[in-house]
Amino acid sequence: MANDAVAGNALSVAPAGIGDGDDPVRGVLAAFTRDLITAVDETLAGFLATEVASLGGIDAAMGGFAATARDCVLAGGKRVRPTFAYWGWRGVVGGDEPLPPVLPALAALELLHTFALVHDDVMDASDTRRGLPTAHRAAAERHRAAGHAGDPDRFGEAVAVLIGDLCMVWADRLLGHAALPPARLLDVRRCYDQMRVETVAGQFLDVLGEHDAANWSVDRALRVARYKTASYTVQRPLLFGACLAGVAPDAPLIAAYTRYGLAVGEAFQLCDDLLGVYGDPETTGKPAGDDLRTGKPTALLMVARQLATPAQRRSLDRVGEALTDRDVDLLAELVVDTGAVHRIGRMIDERVTEALTALESASIDETARIALTGLATAATKRRA
């Protein structure tokens, strides 16, 4: 990336038709995404270097802990939330507004995301994330290797909770580095706080669903998708970007962004439901079939139960039991046979159409419209 492109005004964009084949949307997205992700990562690395050094002054062990938290943040990822926030902002300000004043706020969303991921992995007892051991598993292994007293798994979970908490605090601190007028920063903070509240609400419903699957439904699974994923992945980041640009809460654009964000965010989670059963572990970084093993009542499984014959439903009742790999494969095939995979694919397409319809009526920068159009598809036609 050309650093002066980020330090200057708008991020550079490839000419139409340059990039992935002759598709102008993908060409635009490729250029913008590369530059934006690099800018976010550089902002995070610089901020975290100072934070880790400061915590290392407390105790040598604290320095190692802080470095582990830093590594969780910088371990990769698609930077989806800063990307949607950027385009929410860019849709309002156009191409000439300098990026550096708002870049800390965009990067803060990635720290919030790390908080959610690390805690989610503890709650789901996940073994891997992005192809690597999850934070709690890695901490437990270090406990064993050091020969420390006590339960390594319990220690690992405690460390992971603290890593998530630290990332939440870091997100707050980095958000405060945004160079915005105080009144606008207060409005941004209100949007940010609502995003956090809705994330917690969605996460609670997700946990509850695993322990009350008998009382779950397709509607309730979609409610989890709306609050656990749509809100803090697409909808609120877009509104966050609009707040960074100074848009009033009652402006027509807010309604358009909300409609688009909910539709794409729900489609994003529905895609995740499919990847959780049928994704390639080499690409997703997580084992396939985890949702079948745990019995998580995703929209995919709820639709499968809804469409299943009585015999198929009896087989689906085994979801969440101690299953062999062969059992998981057979259940995955059964879900396809019910027609649920086809139905979920149709639901994804319907939501993408809804999102694009919302964009048609929005008064936004044309480059942002092109990017958000491409993102609606890219976020829901992915393999990881």
Image (spheres, rainbow, N blue to C red):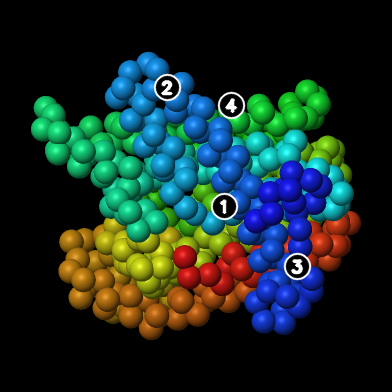
Q: Of the residues under marks 4 and 2, which one precedes in the sequence? A: 2
Q: Nearer the viewer, residue 177 or 354?
A: 177
> Amino acid under label 3?
Ala
In x, y percent, where is residue 360? Answer: 83, 66
Work out how far the residue at label 4 is from the one at label 3, CA to CA, in angstroms. Answer: 34 Å
Ranked by sequence position, the earlier of labels 3 and 1 is 3
Callout 2 amino acid? Leu
> What residue is shown with label 4?
173
**Residue 342, x across and y down, in percent:** 50, 80
Residue under pointer 3: 14
Q: Secondary structure at mark 1?
A: loop
Residue under the point 51% across and 33% down: 48
Q: Amino acid at mark 1?
A: Arg
Amino acid carrying label 4: it is Arg
Image label count: 4
**Residue 232 visible in this rendered orientation of the protein:** no
Q: Is residue 184 left or right of residue 263?
A: right
Q: Are marks 1 and 4 in contact (CB under 8 Å)?
A: no
Horizontal arrangement in the rendering, residue 258 relative to residue 148 (left or right): right
N-terminal label among 3 and 2: 3
Image mark for residue 55: 2
Q: Nearer the viewer, residue 26 or 267?
A: 26
**Residue 141 picture quarter:** top left
Tag 4 secondary structure = helix
Give the crowd class for mark 2: few <14, some 14-19, many >=20 residues within 10 Å: some
Indicate the quadrant containing the N terminus: top left, top right, bottom left or bottom right. bottom right
Classify mark 2: helix, strand or loop: helix
